[in-house]
Amino acid sequence: MQCPSCRFENMPGLDACGRCGSNLKLATAVLDVEPPRATAWQKRLRRWLPWYSANRFRYAARDGRAAAADLLDEAGFPLPEPSILLRFLVPGWAHFFCGQKARGRLFLGAFLGLFGGGILCWGSGLGNFLLGLAVSVHASSVIDILFRRPAGIVSRLVAGFAVMLVLGVAIYFPAGWLATRVAMPVTVQINTPVFKAGEVLLVNTWATPKPGSLVLCSPPRTVGGVYIQAGQFIDRVLAGPGDRVLWENGQLFVNGQPSALSPVNPRLTPRRLEIPQVPADHFFIIPTNVEVRGNWNEQNNPLEPAWLAISLFRADRIDGTVYFRTEPLTRFGPLH
């Protein structure tokens, strides 16, 4: 085997030249002089976006990560290991992974207790307080695993602010937005025959109203000389679009058949009310759980035209279905 450096003929099987000591493996190495070729989608992307370069973005991202790491290191902010980054989503999970099982149980137990209590009291002052404490425990668990080594108070404050911001944007703001759509808390403002001021009710704003549902409605202020409280009220859907309705002497008939449905407060209803057909995109709701002023008589209200007007609600005036009471705790439970 000829040495590529000094041309000395060596015995086969040697790894180094006997004269100059050069590595003989390079003499038999096969070098690929063909550069790596771009894939079909990379060529297409470059044709559509002439400024695009995969290497350019990769190098820029690498340099950006390095610069951010140097900046955070100078500020005393520790970067989490990639292996525990996703484990920050659950309080205590990163502690279990790092072998700190006792601290992990403490953080996880405290979070679940506070979060569960906040969900049970959702919408009330106590519920908001418990949920705030649960978020604080979650942030504290992240900071605790980040600062496993001693650090200054300034670094901890900066880290706490950053952790709260990231958790809020990534988890709690989206979760809160979704929760307010399916469980929007509504506080009763005035005493009515059924609900008392201060009670907290949950409303599903995405649910489709149907006969029998308790709904949150926004009525007009005045109809036919009758003043109805401004704001919202809660009552039951008695019939839907296209139904033929007859309310007579406390009994409901829908499409000629007797119905077991009745308003929330049947005492405050007209003696007779007939609707040949509920219009499209309307629902039949007799508003009995409101504060009503004007020419009113519980047993025989003469304003039949007004009743016809205020009992037909457009779908856009129904804000959601009411299904649960969270406060006071003595009346905690689902609504029927």
Image (cartoon, helix red, strand yellow):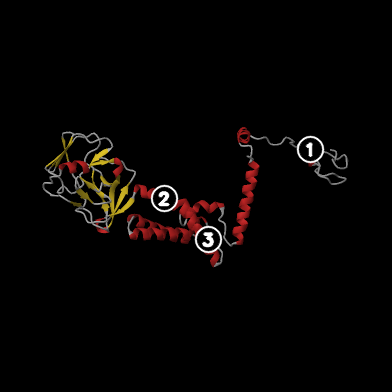
Q: Is 253 displayed left or right of 179 in the figure?
A: left
Mark earlier in primary sequence (1, 2):
1
Q: Amino acid at mark 1?
A: Thr
Q: Which residue is mark 1?
A: 28
Q: Callout 2 environment at 10 Å: few (<14), some (14 to 19), or many (20+)?
A: few
Task: Determine whether label 3 and label 1 are within 8 Å by CB.
Answer: no
Q: x%, y% of residue 179?
A: 37, 49
Q: Secondary structure at mark 2?
A: helix
Q: Residue furthest front?
A: 225
- Label total for image: 3
Q: In this rendering, is residue 52 above or below 87?
A: above
Looking at the picture, tell me which residue is in the foreground, 253 or 149.
253
Q: Which residue is mark 3?
A: 159
Q: Work out how far the residue at label 3 is from the one at label 1, CA to CA, in angstroms.
A: 56 Å
Picture quarter with the N terminus: top right
Q: Amino acid at mark 3?
A: Ala
